[in-house]
Image (cartoon, rainbow, N blue to C red):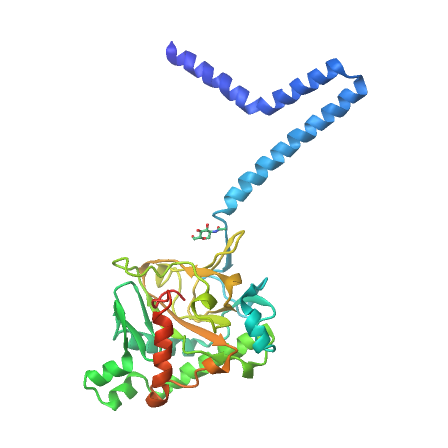
């Protein structure tokens, strides 16, 4: 009995709820027709229909913008192959290059954006770099799930800190020969070829003379896993140029594939209206201008291991890195120390780029 009554009441409420606006409109037009002549009443009727339409449009707008909160556009999926021309997106430049544009007018980004290509680096080059990455990174290991190795400075994540891989080798009483075995001449040659190809591709894409664009020491291999503790949350959103002021372009070479080698770990641009996703794929190059027009993060890896080479490029010759520490340890010692200082005084903890 009482539940029947409740149901009936609900039904009434529902009916009222469903047609609330319509009823109001009808009431309005009824009032109008009592007080006004016929043609004005039609006008009012039209206006109320319009008001109702606007209300519906507003509702649709509201619900779709709510949907946008979780909207994701896949810029490049792991299953597709981007061979002929790259996938490109142009975005409005932020103010972050104002200073660089004055100092380096023909290099600093005038137009900003991103591109993804699967045909910049060959399969054998990618395979080779994956082996180099695995070999080097196997000597370290961050407790936070993201381990980096920078060949230019020797920086290697170890537990909650960094060590210098070249010093590490010395300390463990290995001879120079071991270092040469860790990274052979061929390894370094492939590394140089790959970083150079990517530098040139960025220059072409953004229309700048490649001789004015330099690789920086803020370039490293990264191995990312699902962290066992919360020491460093590498999946935070960030802007590269806010972390390291002198970088103008960022690039990633993926050494493993989303869905096959690991899950999670997709790269995401956090745009205002919708997030744009790049799924890592073995041999895929992604590149973008480093300012706040390209805020991004990469998702926490939930299983497997994700390998990538991160490269940054600058227009400022002062921050150009011309060699590897393994080639000329003395020359680069000071530079490495400086880079370390920059890294450790920033939110950068080996994870934020
Ligand atoms: C983009 O992703 C971030 C992190 O997952 C999320 O907080 C944000 O709401 C997303 N933005 C849009 C517009 O979908």
Using residue 160 as the reference point, say whether residue 107 is left or right of it.
Answer: right
Does any portion of residue 267 appear in the rendered image?
no
Q: Quadrant of residue 166?
A: bottom left
Using residue 116 as the reference point, say whether residue 180 is left or right of it.
Answer: left
| Quadrant showing the C terminus | bottom left
In percent of width and height, residue 177 lies at 25, 90
Residue at (28, 79) in percent of width and height: 165
Q: Quadrant of residue 347?
A: bottom left
Does any portion of residue 147 appear in the rendered image?
yes
In percent of width and height, residue 288 lies at 51, 68
| Quadrant showing the N terminus | top left
In percent of width and height, residue 52 lies at 65, 29
Up the image or down, 351 lies above or below 107; here it is above
Up the image or down, 320 lies above or below 63; here it is below
Front-most of residues 51 and 197: 51
Residue at (25, 83) in percent of width and height: 167
Using residue 101 as the reference point, say whether residue 334 is left or right of it.
Answer: left
Up the image or down, 78 lies above or below 66; here it is below
Residue at (65, 32) in percent of width and height: 53
Front-most of residues 192 and 99: 99
Residue at the outermost left position: 173
In percent of width and height, residue 200 lies at 53, 79
Front-most of residues 53 and 183: 53
Residue at (33, 89) in percent of width and height: 330
Number of numbered discs present? 0
């Amino acid at each position: 009995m009482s539940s029947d009554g409740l149901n009936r009441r609900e039904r009434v409420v529902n009916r009222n709820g469903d047609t609330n606006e319509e009823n109001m409109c009808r009431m309005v037009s009824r009032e109008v027709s009592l007080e006004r002549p016929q043609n004005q009443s039609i006008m009012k009727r039209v206006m109320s229909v319009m008001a109702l339409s606007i209300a519906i449009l507003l509702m649709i707008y509201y619900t779709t913008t709510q949907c946008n909160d979780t909207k994701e556009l896949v810029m490049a999926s792991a299953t597709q192959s981007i061979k002929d021309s790259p996938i490109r997106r142009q975005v409005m430049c932020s103010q972050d290059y104002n200073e660089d544009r004055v100092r380096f007018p023909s290099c600093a980004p005038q137009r900003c954006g991103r591109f993804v290509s699967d045909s910049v680096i060959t399969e054998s080059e990618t395979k080779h770099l994956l082996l180099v990455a695995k070999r080097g990174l196997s000597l370290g290991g961050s407790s936070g799930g993201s381990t980096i190795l920078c060949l230019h400075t020797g920086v290697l994540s170890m537990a909650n800190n960094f060590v210098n891989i070249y010093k590490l080798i010395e300390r463990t009483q290995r001879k120079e020969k071991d270092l040469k075995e860790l990274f052979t001449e061929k390894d370094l040659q492939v590394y140089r070829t790959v970083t150079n190809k990517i530098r040139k591709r960025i220059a072409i894409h953004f229309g700048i003379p490649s001789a004015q664009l330099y690789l920086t020491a803020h370039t490293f291999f990264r191995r990312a896993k699902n962290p066992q503790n919360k020491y460093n949350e590498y999946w935070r959103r960030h802007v590269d140029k806010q972390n390291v002021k002198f970088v103008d372009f960022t690039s990633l070479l993926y050494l493993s594939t989303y869905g096959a080698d690991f899950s999670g770990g997709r790269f995401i641009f956090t745009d205002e209206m919708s997030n744009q996703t790049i799924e890592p794929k073995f041999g895929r190059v992604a590149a973008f201008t480093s300012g706040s027009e390209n805020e991004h993060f990469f998702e926490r890896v939930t299983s497997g291991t994700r390998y990538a080479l991160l490269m940054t490029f600058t227009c400022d010759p002062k921050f150009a890195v011309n060699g590897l520490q393994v080639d000329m340890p003395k020359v680069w010692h000071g530079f490495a120390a400086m880079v370390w200082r920059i890294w450790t005084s920033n939110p950068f903890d080996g994870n934020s780029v």
